[in-house]
Image: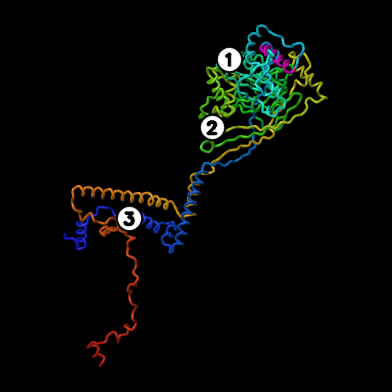
Amino acid sequence: GAMAPGKKITARIKRTLPVKGPQAPTLSELMRWYCLNTNTHGCRRIVVSRGRLRRFIWILLTLSAVGLILWQCAELLMNYYSASVSVTVQFQKLPFPAVTICNINPYKYSSMKDYLSELDKETKKALETFYGFSEGKSKVRRSVDEGNSTGSDFFKQIPLLKFEDFSKTATDLRSGQKRKIEGSVFHKDSSIVNSGDSNDIIGFQLCDANNSSECALYTFSSGVNAIQEWYKLHYMNIMAQIPLETKEKLSYSADDLLLTCFFDGLSCDKRHFTRFHHPLHGNCYTFNSGENGTILSTSTGGSEYGLQVVLYIDEADYNPFLVTSTGAKIIVHDQNEYPFIEDIGTEIETAAATSIGMHFTRSHKLSKPYSDCTETGADIPVENLYNKSYSLQICLHSCFQKAMVDSCGCAQYAQPLPAGAEYCNYKKNPNWMYCYYRLHEKFVKEQLGCQQICKDACSFKEWALTTSIAQWPSTVSEDWMLRVLSWDKGQKINKKLNKTDLANLMVFYKDLNERFISENPANTLVILLSNFGGQLGLWMSCSVVCVIEIIEVFFIDSLSIVMRRQWQKAKKWWNDRKRDRSGKPPEASDLERQGHDNPVCIDEDLPTFNTALRLPLPQDNPLPRTPPPNYSTLRLETAFTEQLPDTLEVGQH
């Protein structure tokens, strides 16, 4: 059919002035439209405010609000992985922990004399040379066969030295000759700095077997420390060569160590103890180890219902150079934990009753991302050399032992053996001591990386110990008690016991309150979103829809406008270039106006934000209004000025 006149005009205009560019607004128009139409009141106030000062104040307030929102939301995100700690205390029947007991002296000195005769002779010689100490007639009997195997050549390589002043001149204890000492000095005792009398400095030198100029000098301000450290060094060499079965025989049996035993008011014996061989402490015995599958528990607190044992220490058979204190060492631990007696053991003195009261605490920390702890240790790249559940101590010791095997070619005596390795001794590994001391120095300075790799365990049990001591046995009961204990001990002891050979130990729960300390997430996603909403509402009266609107306008629309403008510029440049080449005059269509300036763009379109902005503003002259009614027109005589003929006749009648 025929087109309407309006449509014909539009079609003609479109033919003569084709629309090539889209009806794109400018960025400033987009922002103005957003400010007028958004729900965030601050933006609207910037546009509609009259006066520069007021507008500036609103810009400042709006920007401040945006800054505060960003800051508060960043704080909320950073604190999202925070935990709250809760402590629960409950009264219940508690499992009794494992109690490991060791004699401070690892091996009977009488049994060890054959192995240690050469070392003891050398030590006594040092004491005589440096301190004038002599026992008179030597008590150490020398075994010719064993004496050769301990390697007296080795003592020549690493002799004890006495240093004069702070020079590098030292006296050799074997030859008594002075000699120059090369190498870096490591002071094992910080008090050397304050030591006025430098003649007291004693130490030893360790050299690299492969490079004799590489030496480390270890000095001690105390002669006691120097002699003990030097003795331990050679002692570990000797012990590393003795097989485990032999060492177990050389140490104390359960019958030797345990005289009496009570638990929870009932008698117990050596069958309730499990033997555990520790490299530095010999045979230790663990009560309630849980090896047979049953773990004892206690339903009553107090000393009468815990573990009570009397230990036979046998001080006369102590190694005089290896240990300088008498007594036993005990450690309270979980059945799955390794007892690190050398690190955290509690010492029990002889001729005393030691009471150890316990408080039990279980702790559980949240793992990543809340804290840097490990649940099972499976994520730690260190092999667990101990056949027990993961702990930080196990990881550190295993890490050092692995580094020792890699660097020195053998394992350190005090820790378990990795697969395929053997313990260091000077015959097979002449360089191990220099290597070990250097490596240990790196370990202490945290240069091996073990402290960085190893993490705390997330779950752990802890028994807090309170120790109290009383004299035992009392003077009045001493005589009969020692006689009875000697009788109980039987034929193994042919003499009456000394009280300095005995130690009484009690381990018990002070109360049956189990404290459980746990971490719980302080935030959840719901709380985080609620906090975000609160910040947006407080500072900008904004919601999620408002945030979507900001993303749409400031990112999507703004980007499309910029890209559109760039495209139009590129297109214009290309058309100009083509025209210049062909030499054609510019077409009418090239003069078209782009965007909102093009009048045809508003043809038949629904109003958008830019067309709405282009609506004409009200004129200064007021538009004519509908006039108010003239009430006089309601009167008939004025409304009808001429009477009709028929009404006139009626009036005349």
Task: Please give the residue where the numbered disc 1 appears in the rendered image.
Answer: 430
- Tell me which secondary structure the magenta stretch mostly adopts: helix
Q: Which mark is residue 25?
A: 3
Residue type pointed to by label 1: Pro
Q: Quadrant of residue 329?
A: top right
| Residue 449 drawn at (x, y percent) | 54, 28
Name the spot of residue 98 as percent of width and height, x first: 64, 26
Give me the residue at 24% from left, 47% from top: 574
Q: CA distance from mark 2 to mark 3?
A: 59 Å
Q: Residue at x 24, y 90 (%)?
A: 648
| Distance (Cα) linking label 3 and label 1 | 86 Å
- Label disc, if present, on residue 375 of the rendered structure: 2
Instruction: Choose the circle earlier in sequence order: 2 or 1.
Output: 2
Image quarter in which the C terminus is found: bottom left
Callout 2 amino acid: Glu
Q: Is residue 60 magenta?
A: no
The earlier-in-sequence mark between 2 and 3 is: 3
The magenta segment is 115-131
Q: Nearer the viewer, residue 571 or 23?
A: 571
In the current view of this chain or complex, which residue is farthest to the left? 1
> Could you tell me if the residues under marks 2 and 3 are in contact, i.e. CB atoms within 8 Å?
no
As drawn, the label of residue 134 is none
Q: The residue tagged with tag 2: helix, strand or loop?
A: loop
The amino acid on which the numbered mark 3 sits, given as a three-letter code, is Pro
Estimate the x, y position of residue 588 in percent, counting from the top left.
20, 56
Alpha-carbon span between mark 2 and mark 1: 41 Å
